[in-house]
Image (tube, rainbow, N blue to C red):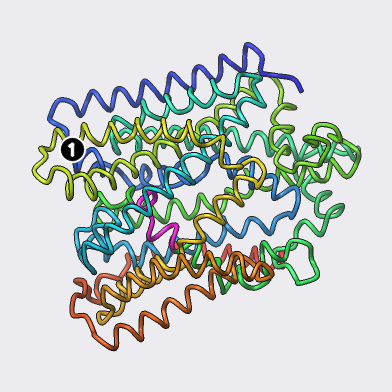
């Protein structure tokens, strides 16, 4: 494969200077006054709707999408886009129902919600769960996959790429959430521009392969030549049914995956928790529109690579250790870009990785500082000390990720699937505890504890004892059992420790309702067309 040329490195260097300089400028501006812990962790009141929406997407899209989801596009087709498109619908639900509850009750971290709604025991157990999950699963996989992709494309040493990504992310993260939020706007710009450039080239290659020209013609040829790769709903006789089991992607476990990720996840909700409700909702709606675009950037290139592979192209490039490796699809296409444009797409991939690393590291430092250090180590810590501890937590978490990531076998399982399976062991019980705590005042602390711990143990048991049940269906089963047990336990000793909720909280503005309606119409059309 052709590696990066001087012009590509120049384009990438310009991207690096823009992001680093802008982040440093924001950091210096807010150093004129003492940084408070709330400002560092939440950027309270400082992020606009477009910064919140951009930051949500920048934190969400990383190497597991560019490499893993594109690889899934190569192997199973457009159906994998359901993770992105269902997320758009989920974000509307989070904006309407979840965010007003958090903001009305002054919730800034997810463990804080559990303390306020249940007790310190439930909160502490989940804080430890989240720290373990964020560091051992999310941070490590993002760093590993990002370094692997960048090393493959650039030819640079893998370890050097891993350290470089970690240092870049640390530079952004130690400035606090305000720096992350506004630099993410630039990251998303590069991510979308570079991603669209790769998609454009991929569709042009398809059209040229069949003697025609034009992106539209390339897409039409893909529909014609590989129609099975445009099925959104799999039947039981299709080879990837276990990964995306039929209607479960619309009415089953996929909702648990997305609602837990977008609505009960410090890593994500932190972007909106420092804003007022109107701004938070507008930012979430903006993110939902961007999610509609993501499959164009991360899935279509994989399908294009499959179409070309079927025509005899990339036979050697798509293999690793003598076997077909779908995760090679995106790097293969990236290496075909012309000089300069390849540097832009390389910057887009780096932007996605760094933004996700920064967002994850900030959430780790937030939970550790506010829910572990402040509670159990130094309850009287000053604002300055809390910020210092938060920055130390960022650096330590990155070092841990660098050290342990090569030992997790991420490359063997595939990054996207690795993250889904690991987080899926925790998600059903946690989401049950959150949603019952939101909307049923009688839910007690013992019920929440049983759901969180018992749900995890049940999910692990089903993983080994019932491997024939699709992953998403197992999540749905665990969730329903957790809810049933929570109802039984809570009825035996009802709680009175509800949240401050009233119906007026869930009213939305006309502009939000219109935007949400447009998204629903688009999603309905997409699923009807590609059914």
Depth check: give the residue in front, 305 or 64.
64
In this rendering, does residue 184 appear at all? Answer: yes
In this rendering, does residue 104 appear at all? Answer: no
Answer above or below: position of 463 versus 311: below
Q: Quadrant of the N terminus?
A: top right
Q: Position of residue 302 (x, y in %)?
A: 72, 44
The residue to which callout 1 is attached is 386
Q: Quadrant of residue 475?
A: bottom right
Answer above or below: position of 243 versus 161: below
Q: Quadrant of residue 54?
A: top left
Q: Position of residue 390 (x, y in %)?
A: 26, 36
In the shown orientation, is residue 190 left or right of residue 42?
Answer: right
Depth check: give the residue in front, 34 or 245.
245
Element under label 1? helix
Q: Residue shown at 23%/57% (left/top)?
A: 112
Q: Position of residue 150 (x, y in %)?
A: 60, 27
Question: Is 250 included in the stretch rendered in magenta?
Answer: no
Q: Residue shown at 31%/44% (left/top)?
A: 48
Q: Residue shown at 74%/32% (left/top)?
A: 332
In the shown orientation, is residue 16 left or right of residue 415?
Answer: left
In the shown orientation, is residue 165 left or right of residue 171?
Answer: right
- Please provide the residue range marked out in magenta: 260-269
Answer above or below: position of 499 versus 385: below
Depth check: give the residue in front, 502 or 251.
251
Q: Residue shown at 59%/32% (left/top)?
A: 194
């Amino acid at each position: 494969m052709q590696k990066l040329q001087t012009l590509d490195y120049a384009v990438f260097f310009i991207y690096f200077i823009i992001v680093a300089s802008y982040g440093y400028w924001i950091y210096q501006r807010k150093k004129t006054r003492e940084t408070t812990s709330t400002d560092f962790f939440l950027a309270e009141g400082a992020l606009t709707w477009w910064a919140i929406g951009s930051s949500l997407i920048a934190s969400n899209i990383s190497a597991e999408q560019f490499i893993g989801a594109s690889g899934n596009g190569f192997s199973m087709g457009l159906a994998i886009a359901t993770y992105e498109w269902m997320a758009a619908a989920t974000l509307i639900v989070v904006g309407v129902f979840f965010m007003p509850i958090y903001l009305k009750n002054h919730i800034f971290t997810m463990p804080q919600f559990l303390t306020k709604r249940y007790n310190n025991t439930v909160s502490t157990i989940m804080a430890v769960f989240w720290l373990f999950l964020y560091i051992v699963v999310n941070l490590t996989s993002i760093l590993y996959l990002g370094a692997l992709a960048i090393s493959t494309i650039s030819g640079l040493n893998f370890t050097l790429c891993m350290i470089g990504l970690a240092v870049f992310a640390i530079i952004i993260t130690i400035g606090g959430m305000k720096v992350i939020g506004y630099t993410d706007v630039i990251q998303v710009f590069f991510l979308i521009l570079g991603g669209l450039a790769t998609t454009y080239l991929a569709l042009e290659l398809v059209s040229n392969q069949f003697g025609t020209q034009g992106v539209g013609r390339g897409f039409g040829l893909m529909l014609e030549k590989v129609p099975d790769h445009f099925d959104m709903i799999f039947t039981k006789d299709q080879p990837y049914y276990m990964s995306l089991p039929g209607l479960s992607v619309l009415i089953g476990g996929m909702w648990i995956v997305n609602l837990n990720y977008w609505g009960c996840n410090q890593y994500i909700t932190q972007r909106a928790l420092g804003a007022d409700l109107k701004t938070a909702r507008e930012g979430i709606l903006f993110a939902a529109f961007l999610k509609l675009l993501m499959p164009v950037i991360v899935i279509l290139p994989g399908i294009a690579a499959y179409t070309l592979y079927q025509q005899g192209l990339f036979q050697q490039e798509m293999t690793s250790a003598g076997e077909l490796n779908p995760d090679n699809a995106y790097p293969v296409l990236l290496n075909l870009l012309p000089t300069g444009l390849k540097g832009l797409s390389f910057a887009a991939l780096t932007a996605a990785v760094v933004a996700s690393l920064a967002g994850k590291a900030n959430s780790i430092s937030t939970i550790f500082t506010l829910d572990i250090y402040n509670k159990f180590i130094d309850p009287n810590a000053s604002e300055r000390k809390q910020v210092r501890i938060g920055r130390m937590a960022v650096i330590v978490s990155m070092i841990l990720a660098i050290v342990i990531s090569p030992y997790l076998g991420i490359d063997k399982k595939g990054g996207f699937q690795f993250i889904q399976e690991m987080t899926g062991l925790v998600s059903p019980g946690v989401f049950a505890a959150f949603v019952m705590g939101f909307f049923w005042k009688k839910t007690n602390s013992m019920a929440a504890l049983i759901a969180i711990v018992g749900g995890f143990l049940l999910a692990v048991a089903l993983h080994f004892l019932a491997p024939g049940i699709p992953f998403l269906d197992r999540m749905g089963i665990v969730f329903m059992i957790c809810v049933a047990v929570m109802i039984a336990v809570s009825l035996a000793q009802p709680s009175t420790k509800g949240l401050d909720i009233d119906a007026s909280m869930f009213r939305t503005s006309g502009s939000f309702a219109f935007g949400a309606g447009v998204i629903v119409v688009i999603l309905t059309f997409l699923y009807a067309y590609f059914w």
